[in-house]
Amino acid sequence: MFMKAALAAIGAAALVIPGAAAAQQFYSPRDAQLYPAQYYGQPRGDYYGRARGRFGGYPEFRGIEDHIRSEIREGVREDLIEPDDARDLFGQLRGIQGQEAREFRVHGWNLPDDDRYRLRTQLQQLDALVDQIRAEPEG
């Protein structure tokens, strides 16, 4: 009889312990240090959909960056852009994306307006350069 009571007590404890552990989960100030984007009203962007720790660029610039990439590739396919020029243009795009990554390390998802304007202007200038190269007559 003592053995049955001991087994029943162990079984009951096994059921109660996970419930007690779940009841103790709560937000602490340490959580805000570990996951600051989830707290304090900061936008999360789409960082969490990517490989952990890898910044994929600000979503607001992806459209123009994809457009520039496709224009360069198309220009090479149509013999409007020389492969060496394409490498240089892709290098300029990577340079702008490197600036984005540095800004992200400093500001996170809250990119200041002056940095946003500067990056957008650089991307627009690169897009205009690609269009200009594609429009030049071969000579």
Image (spheres, rainbow, N blue to C red):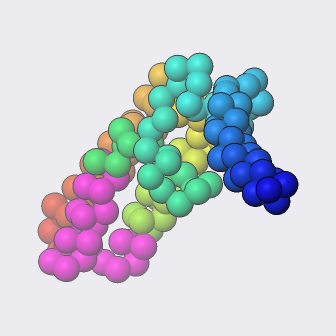
Q: Is residue 86 magenta?
A: yes
Q: Is residue 132 visible?
A: no
Q: Give me the residue at 20% from left, 71% from top.
A: 74
Please tell me how many numbered marks the rendered image carries: 0
Q: Is residue 137 magenta?
A: no
Q: Name the spot of residue 91 as percent of width and height, x first.
A: 48, 65
The quadrant of the picture occupied by the N terminus is bottom right
Task: Tell me if residue 118 comes above or below residue 66 in the rendering.
Answer: above
The quadrant of the picture occupied by the C terminus is bottom left
139 lies left or right of 122: left
Q: Give me the residue at 76% from left, 57% from top.
A: 4
Q: Give me the residue at 68% from left, 41% from top.
A: 16
Q: Is residue 20 visible?
A: yes
Q: Nearer the viewer, residue 67 or 6?
A: 6
Q: Give me the residue at 25% from left, 55% from top.
A: 67
Task: Tell me if residue 72 comes above or below residue 13 in the rendering.
Answer: below
Q: Nearer the viewer, residue 32 or 110?
A: 32
Q: Which residues are magenta?
A: 64-87
Residue furthest to the front in view is 1
Q: Name the spot of residue 136 as percent of width and height, x first.
A: 19, 64
Q: Name the spot of residue 40 as percent of width and height, x first.
A: 59, 19
Q: Quadrant of residue 84?
A: bottom left
Q: Name the spot of residue 21 as percent of width and height, x first.
A: 71, 39
Task: Tell me if residue 3 comes above or below residue 58 in the rendering.
Answer: below
Q: Quadrant of residue 121?
A: top left
Task: Tell me if residue 18 comes above or below residue 138 in the rendering.
Answer: above
77 lies left or right of 92: left
Secondary structure character of the magenta stretch overall: helix
Q: Nearer the viewer, residue 132 or 68?
A: 68
Residue furthest to the right in view is 2
